[in-house]
Image (cartoon, helix red, strand yellow):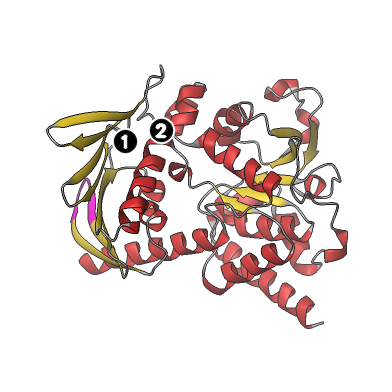
Amino acid sequence: MKARLSRWLGNARSMLVYLLGGSLWVRAVRDGTAGALLRAVLKPPRNGRRVAVRRGGEGSVRVGLIGFGRQAASILWPAMRQVSSLRLVAVGVRRERVATPAGLGLPDDVALTRGHEAVLNRTDVEAVIIATPTSLHEMLTREALRRGKHVFCEVPGIVTGARGLRLARWAEGADLRVQYDFRFHHAPPYGQLLRRGRDWRAEGRPVVLDVEGSERLHLYTLVLGLSEGPCRVQCEERSANGAKYTIETDDGVRMIYREHRSPRVEKAHLRSGERLLSLESGSELSEVRGEGVATLWRYDGGDDLLKLPEDFRAENGIPGSAYLHARGFIPGLRSFADAVQRGERPACDIVFAARAQTLYRDLVRSRWRAS
């Protein structure tokens, strides 16, 4: 009874936040998700509706995709096609009666359903990918866990504080994997930066990460890949082009994040004493070694690496596989599949997402204080 009441109150709180969103409520009515949220509050699903769950093993992970908007159609689905360990079996769309798999560019054997509930109730779906409006992320993650599904969720996920920790304990107790798409942690150049930074920290060296760019959510969370300690945030300056933040941790990591509004700017420098790794324009990672410079990674794809996914969608285009790999879309999905198959903890799990949300809150507060 106590667990049921707690579950009901959690859903009611989520709905209150959702209703107070104003425009989000209008979007929910338009997208056909308001009824699902209302049913989740009034009649929470019982844990007994769970299906068989993979505990690790060989073979492709059978995936259901919830939401098939522009992001899913132009980024997620093209990236999934490059990951052989994922197999799409069902897609929850807004209006299944006016859509066909071929019309959406999907294989004929993919089942189309109306909304998310039919996807979550399918016994042949082991994991779900959540690609819906942000306001639904936490609710859908919770519903998927109740039905025994692994979860890959777009960011930000909106899990904070105690709710995030409860979700994490729930997922761990059910032996389920939840990963959030902080894709730069899996992108080749930034992944190398983080690995080198962790190696330097293991040697007892202080580390300074200096980052500039417009991909805010993916860039400022890089500091969380170097330290598991709490962060202190200070907004140093503001301008029409963005802001400059200093983020410091208790265990010796310092990050300077230069928020830039132009998508044409992206730089990263990792320093430890005389050691330096430099990423210019997001496309070439080099290391200074004595008097010389060694190239560690270079982007050789045909697409513009600094073009945002929104630019591809505006042009009705789909980025190539080299772009999807370099920006972390393909490696992120492959990492999720590996975590499910091996029964391992994902790198960017619920606890990581909650820390990212706390860091974002502190960035906003420091910006307000600076103004």
Q: Is residue 241 magenta?
A: yes
Of mark 2 and mark 1, the one earlier in the sequence is 1
Instruction: Name the residue type under label 1.
Output: Pro
| Residue 327 x, y percent position in the rendering | 44, 34
* Res 16 quadrant in image: bottom right
- Identify the residue at the far bottom of this view: 2
Secondary structure mostly taken by the magenta-highlighted segment of the chain:
strand
Tell me the quarter of the image containing the C terminus. Answer: bottom left
Q: Amino acid at mark 2?
A: Leu
- How far apart marks 2 and 1 lie (CA) works out to 7 Å
Q: Which residues are magenta?
A: 238-244
Q: SS at mark 1?
A: loop
Q: Is residue 211 visible?
A: yes
Q: Residue at x 50, y 63 (%)?
A: 354
Question: According to the image, label 1 marks what residue?
Answer: 263
Magenta span includes 272 = no
Residue, x 66% and y 54% (percent of image)? Answer: 177
Q: The N terminus lies in which quarter of the figure?
A: bottom right
Q: Can you tell which mark lies on residue 324?
A: none
Residue 96 left/right relative to 69? right
Q: Circle 2 is placed at which residue position?
A: 308
Badges 2 and 1: C-beta atoms under 8 Å apart? yes
Q: Viewed as shown, does residue 55 lie left or right of 202?
A: right
The foreground one among 49 and 364 is 49
- Seen in the picture, residue 343 relative to 59 is either above or below; the reply is below
